[in-house]
Amino acid sequence: MISNRFALLTALIFTCTTAAYATKGAVHFTDMSQQKIELAAPAERIVVIPIPAASMLVSVDESSKRLAGMHPFAGVAARDGMLSVMFPDVLSVRSDMVGNDFAPNIEALLSVNPDLVWQWGHRGDDIITPMRNAGLTVATLDYGKEAYTQEWLTLMGKTLGKETKTADLIAWRKQVINQLENSVAAIPEDKQPRVLYLSHFKQSIQTFGATSHNNADFALAGGVSLNRDLTGPRTLNIEQILVWDPDIILLGNFEAGLAPADIYNNPMLSDVTAVKNKRVYKLPIGGFIWDAPNQETPLYWQWLSQIFHPETASFPLREEIRKRYLQLYGYSLTEAETDRILQLDLNQDGRDYLTLMGRP
């Protein structure tokens, strides 16, 4: 009788303990389309279709092992930037999960057997429903505001079991926002530089429009985005650049090989203020390109503030980059790698760049 009771008690304890661990391991969250998502445990095989979010996952996890698939451009950015240096295995992650306009490749997705697929939620159900119909667990992200990017971090933390780290990263973002709002962002607009961002220039001249997060980024750093009211086509011509006559031109990382020299060497732009004053700069690229929202964006804001207001810049950005890479990736940067992130080779002729961003 005693042995039977002992056996029953042991079984009860085991059952309760197992249930407790199962409950602890389960992941429940609401995605950015307000869909409730349930996972039996933190995801181990994840496909990330939103381009900037793949590098964010790797950063939060400090590993690419759980990244089972990503967008082709995320693969390009990983190869060209620091992500593949810090996590070489990311180069082996498949990037055939999605086609044009983020349309999912169902066959490729099923072949990697993901626990979770991240997809954009603001681009319509056509890129979500086929995956759910195929039996995949899909969670969504939205784009365009800093609050959204902070929510990406929160959701990544939940799904990876890294909530403490992502809370710290969000606190850092808020700290930098507060610092800039109380300094350069408070400069009267008529004393701020007028800034033009170009994502492409060689084949066609392209920029962003009124809905881009970059408008808020520039304002936070104390600059006026010349294309903040652009609601029509985002393709420009030389004449429009001449009319705007920007004080600063920033070149993005979406067009391969685009460099300040392409602007300086164009005779039609020789009278533009940014060209005459040597204030054309290539944006940095680290774990991801800085011209898209990502885990490194506070560094981008600080970089912008120094480019826009070099006369007041005293913040040791190189030191901050090294400090934050330890927090973001658990990686210790060399001086040469910091030069690479800051695109020092392309920007060395830019006004004040070596003074602001060069080695001590």
Image (spheres, grey):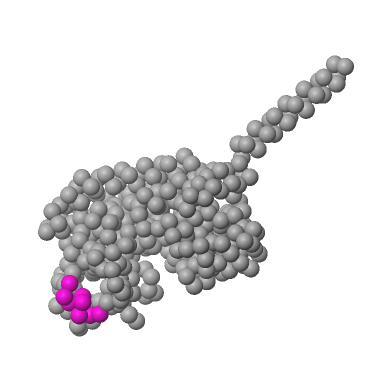
Q: Position of residue 318 (x, y in %)?
A: 31, 53
- Residue found farthest to the bottom: 267
Q: Main secondary structure of the magenta part?
A: helix
Work out whether 335 lies above or below 104: above
Residue in front for this viewpoint, 288 or 83: 288
Asked if residue 298 lies left or right of residue 60, the reply is: left
Quadrant of res 283: bottom left
Asked if residue 334 lies left or right of residue 29, the reply is: left
The residue positioned 34% from the left and 81% from the top of the image is: 203
Boundaries of the magenta span: 237-244
Q: Is residue 240 magenta?
A: yes
Asked if residue 258 lies left or right of residue 306, the reply is: right
Q: Position of residue 140 (x, y in %)?
A: 49, 55
Q: Position of residue 272 (x, y in %)?
A: 16, 75
Residue 112 seen in render: no
- Residue found farthest to the right: 1
The residue positioned 59% from the left and 46% from the top of the image is: 38
Q: Quadrant of the C terminus?
A: bottom left
Q: Position of residue 170 (x, y in %)?
A: 39, 45
The residue positioned 20% from the left and 59% from the top of the image is: 223
The residue positioned 62% from the left and 44% from the top of the image is: 41
Q: Is residue 47 magenta?
A: no
Q: Quadrant of the N terminus?
A: top right
- Residue found farthest to the top: 2
Residue in front for this viewpoint, 349 or 200: 200
Work out whether 216 lies above or below 8: below
Residue 277 seen in render: yes
- Number of callouts in the render? 0
